[in-house]
Image (cartoon, coloured by chain):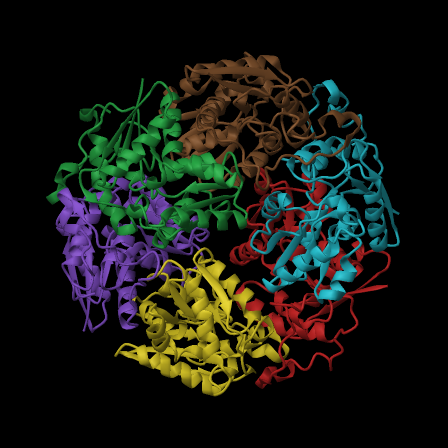
Chain colours: A green, B brown, C cyan, D purple, E yellow, F red
Amino acid sequence: MTKILIVNPNTTASMTETIGAAARAVAASGTEIIAVTSAMGPVSIEGYYDEAFAVPGLIQALLNAPDADAAIVACFDDTGLDAARTAAHFPVVGICEAALVTAGQIAKRIAVVTTLPRSIVPLEELVRRYGYAERARVTACDVAVLDLDKPGSGAEAKLEAEIARALDKGAEAIVLGCAGMADLPQKLSRKFGVPVVDGVAAAVKQAEALAGLKLATSRRGSYASPGVKKYTGLLEEFAPSDPSLRGA
Amino acid sequence: MTKILIVNPNTTASMTETIGAAARAVAASGTEIIAVTSAMGPVSIEGYYDEAFAVPGLIQALLNAPDADAAIVACFDDTGLDAARTAAHFPVVGICEAALVTAGQIAKRIAVVTTLPRSIVPLEELVRRYGYAERARVTACDVAVLDLDKPGSGAEAKLEAEIARALDKGAEAIVLGCAGMADLPQKLSRKFGVPVVDGVAAAVKQAEALAGLKLATSRRGSYASPGVKKYTGLLEEFAPSDPSLRGA
Amino acid sequence: MTKILIVNPNTTASMTETIGAAARAVAASGTEIIAVTSAMGPVSIEGYYDEAFAVPGLIQALLNAPDADAAIVACFDDTGLDAARTAAHFPVVGICEAALVTAGQIAKRIAVVTTLPRSIVPLEELVRRYGYAERARVTACDVAVLDLDKPGSGAEAKLEAEIARALDKGAEAIVLGCAGMADLPQKLSRKFGVPVVDGVAAAVKQAEALAGLKLATSRRGSYASPGVKKYTGLLEEFAPSDPSLRGA
Amino acid sequence: MTKILIVNPNTTASMTETIGAAARAVAASGTEIIAVTSAMGPVSIEGYYDEAFAVPGLIQALLNAPDADAAIVACFDDTGLDAARTAAHFPVVGICEAALVTAGQIAKRIAVVTTLPRSIVPLEELVRRYGYAERARVTACDVAVLDLDKPGSGAEAKLEAEIARALDKGAEAIVLGCAGMADLPQKLSRKFGVPVVDGVAAAVKQAEALAGLKLATSRRGSYASPGVKKYTGLLEEFAPSDPSLRGA
Amino acid sequence: MTKILIVNPNTTASMTETIGAAARAVAASGTEIIAVTSAMGPVSIEGYYDEAFAVPGLIQALLNAPDADAAIVACFDDTGLDAARTAAHFPVVGICEAALVTAGQIAKRIAVVTTLPRSIVPLEELVRRYGYAERARVTACDVAVLDLDKPGSGAEAKLEAEIARALDKGAEAIVLGCAGMADLPQKLSRKFGVPVVDGVAAAVKQAEALAGLKLATSRRGSYASPGVKKYTGLLEEFAPSDPSLRGA
Amino acid sequence: MTKILIVNPNTTASMTETIGAAARAVAASGTEIIAVTSAMGPVSIEGYYDEAFAVPGLIQALLNAPDADAAIVACFDDTGLDAARTAAHFPVVGICEAALVTAGQIAKRIAVVTTLPRSIVPLEELVRRYGYAERARVTACDVAVLDLDKPGSGAEAKLEAEIARALDKGAEAIVLGCAGMADLPQKLSRKFGVPVVDGVAAAVKQAEALAGLKLATSRRGSYASPGVKKYTGLLEEFAPSDPSLRGA
């Protein structure tokens, strides 16, 4: 049995449910999905500021699950992914990175369609960091994260219009750029006749892959465990302790 | 049950066995591995010329397996991968690409250690195409492919020396740059204390991922099915026929 | 006397004639042009699959002409160019690469106008590999290769419309992205008032240049002669033999 | 009078003193330097994990200083810089970015010498993001941040040895890659005969520049003010409120 | 007192006045601005040819001002900047580079709006050299330099239309791409509600920064002082003499 | 008969002789080589400053030869090449660009070996601009230009040592990075067993190519003819006049 922890790094529990359901729908028979909601921070993550304040809750959720075999950060900004990898005793997968590596194996040109325009540049930075800048374009359908499943918000029509524009410009596959869109890929794929990749589903498979290969995050170089040191104030409890004491 | 076809695009059956064993060792419980040897072409693939002549045998093996759920090209040059994707009715995974996307999720800086120096530039071109040029360096341990498992060839010592050099220069994870090294990752990982990724194992997981997500190669743009047309001479039989006749 | 072999790597003899005529029109007085049609493979090359199956016929044509001073691969995908360079005893020029290096010496921004949209991405990959990604854009006029000279196909009007669009977006010179357009550059250049470069003509001059400088393909590194080894099945005859036996 | 707030985002007050002194030493006559120590988080910032937990304290310090004309984040990782820019009512300068733009105007090739090897990759990512990847190399002298001014730690000798190596490899100017080195540039510049740039000093000048030009962070696109929304738990107080209420 | 020399490398004195006024408007209280007009060369600099012939006049002006603390080349092509840096005894700032490093600290995506289309490619080359190619787009408003302040030329309307287009495409800040626009930033910034950066003003601050930090151009590597040698003909007087004789 | 003008942009006539001889040695039978020495400027071109002052003499030489079919700028910095292209009525070839496009067709990895270390960065900038940054490394053998053919200077031994180092690091072909090395390629190629490309010889062939294809520099965009305007002072005579008056 492989235990995969999915952390929704925002505090909106209904979104965690959508995410958990999408994850379970694609999980292998031997995979257990544990979807948790962050206990602190923003109700949705839109832009650099929200991102920064979502990290402590994310890390807390990871540290509270010492027996997971792999974990997923279920926000398309891959919020706090690098910090999470240094902290967790198991591999950690980001849904943006997972979606890109998946789409990249079935298509040469990719469109990432996200929610608000303010997220375009942060996602472009991720796309470049992951090496997909020449292959993936980022666009926004101009819908707030929490409006995605609000009836009457027109969200789906806006998303579909943006997908159509991306295909016109040469996209060969679509990546849905928000964890809140995790229930849509099948429907959109049928409608547009191209692969549509949801990051949550893609991340479940990447997490199963890393767990199945018994691969752990490298401790050499940039992902070395945090050095033991003192933290003060509100965040005191997050001070890195001796990893050998934490069972690493 | 997921059926994964692994094609060894060279004609050396003993290498297919190593590959098949490595694949089965990591396959999920519901995965059937079918490892086949190419029926025509070079006994090993070293450089651009061998690569070109390995493609027809690879394509033939793919077309002979219409009921696979996914396939793997088991040569680290990802020989003929683009042609394979346009031809096959199922997703096709390359072991170089699979190894890079896997290593990239557990380490920031990667060393790819291949066999002969003549393969460095072709692999650098792949690494760049996949978007890992800033993160992955390619080096060679100067061992011919078919010497890898010859007793007394000194192959393993040369490979280990090259890995040590790569770690000194900042590599955080190692990718083994030849399908013939598929039996070595655990041993090397223990020895050097860093993740060591074998492309065959990584590709099994990526193939399971694509099959599990029911994602097919995009038919829009560069991976469109080959247009129906006449081929002549020796290669006549490979002429693309109407895909609807082939059950696509 | 310099002997330049031009191989049309598709099997359509009428296209070889267009290519041969374009080559002879620009050849220096001391240059003999030998235009040959591939004896096996696809009637036209459109996309990755056709490309792969055009390579054996191309290599055969090169090996059958041991006394050439230089050769040209006359398909804009530069089909099999790397394999050809390792195999031939004389330098080999690709028409895409030749067109880009030529256009790049008379203009800073280049538009490559090719036939079908499915060829855009393969050509973008070539353009990037050759180092022209920042300077050259690839577009398609949506005409099949074999329709280029069909009366009533509207091919020329579509090509001209695409050129006009490219100039509007800042192109300073046009590269014709298909060997089948080799008869058009003068006419289009007069019409649009910008340099129009045909790859076949450009390649003749690059082949004359390399032959005139007595430069051979480097045998150090990635273009080393293929190692002597066994090939089996349909492609057995292509097995690399001892180059010293082939007069290299 | 221009008020420049310098936030040391770690909690080590002695380091704030070094930083404040270095800042005052280069400040213009009309500039007031206010150096503050973060009230929460790690005692030193080494790697992704520490970085993440330094952000809330940094943001708090910025929000507590509504009347500054510009601010500086005084950690060479430019910790939380993007979040800081969306939150603050005044421009915010990072010492890594400031050092690079300064060094880039007096030299073509730059070496950034930082403390621990684990910081090399995070800094390389910054350097790339800022556009200096082709011009700046990052190396480490293998000294922990808090050992920099410990007598007997051998820190200075290690730093000098690393600078010498960088000059041998072609560096034309040196950037000191840690705020804790702010007292060293003059001495090192004299010793090696090349410009040595300290990020703190450079940032004071960039902050004076932005304040003097009355330029504010753009609110269009990625640096838009955080949307008003609820934050929960430990970090509740950081919830973005209506900027008009905050006097923006 | 800091003495900043601003050289207008074209010979149009009225433009020097605009430039000098813009510089004085932002100079710190302790800064003296000395604006000089080149004594030889083109009346305006538009394209590579004019650029080349503006360099001797620029160098002459720099060599005539041995007691400056820093200098500015006030043409947005950063005409002759590299040569100027090797020749001058004080740091030299280019207005294009200064504008980019300034805008880059308050916005992620930048639009550079210049005068004539023929300047787009030269500026794109600068932008790439400075490392801003992924962040800054260059466009032209199609107004000749000397028409910028001609009443009735429609120049301002064209410039504003181009700015509006750039913002629509995602620009977060505007850089004015000609020294002749130095009087417009405040007005345009108010109109469009985004930061508008003028290179002259930005350069004054960068010059103050370098002078304040007592940083000189590196003499190691590419900016080494010109070797002493003979020049002949018209340009004889520019022959590099022994720098120790020139008080360096 | 094709007339090719070679301008040595430095004023050392003995170097023009070496260059002219190298050019004639490879020129086609129908090619006339006219080698001229610049009438003003530096005796050798080493670094940005010399480069700038070599341009007027170069342009003068080009304007004095209205009936050439093509021209070559015979300094490896491609001194003033862009300005030359806008000014001349015939195509202009740079020896650095010509050498790179030539070497790039016979090798994947190239080493450019130049004279002084100060030229490395300027050449790296050229190499990047031409698109060869991923394929070509620049190194220096630390010999001054005018010492290249001085008996007893040890120049040749230093050059050979540098070539050996470059081959060890993976170079597949060598480009000689100074016009003053034009007499060495055959000898070095024999010694090292790899292609050695001299820029002067390569440029003759590129000039023959452009002339043979009747291709002219594009007048659209960045290479548009200089606008008619006034120049003053020493350089007055270089003012662009109406091209129709100059017979363009």
Is residue E214 visible to the viewer in this orientation of the structure? yes
Q: Is residue E245 left or right of residue F16?
A: left
Q: Image height check: is E204 above or below F15?
A: below
Give me the residue at 49% from left, 58% from top.
E128
Residue toward you, A165 or D60:
A165
Q: Quadrant of residue E229?
A: bottom right
Toward the left, the furthest residue is A233
Query: Outermost residue, front direction?
Result: A152
Where does residue A229 sit, x and y in percent of width and height?
A: 17, 37
Task: Tell me the quarter of the image containing the N terminus of chain D.
Answer: bottom left
- In the image, F117 versus A245, the foreground residue is A245
Q: Is residue D229 left or right of residue B110?
A: left
Q: Is residue F177 above or below residue B137?
A: below
Q: Work out which quarter of the rendered image holds the C terminus of chain D and state it.
A: bottom left
Q: Quadrant of residue D192?
A: bottom left
Query: Where does residue D71 sit, x and y in percent of width and height?
Result: 22, 61
Q: Quadrant of residue D62?
A: bottom left
Expressed as whole percent of the image width and height from the top left, the position of residue B208 reads 45, 24
Residue occupying image coordinates x 74% and y 25%:
B237
Q: Nearer the viewer, residue D205 or E121?
A: E121
B175 with respect to A204 (left or right): right
* Image x and y of residue A135, in percent: 50, 44
Confirm whether residue F5 shows in the render.
Answer: no
Counting the numbered discs, the total is 0
| E17 over D129 or under it: above or below | below
Which residue occupies 51% across, 66% down? E123
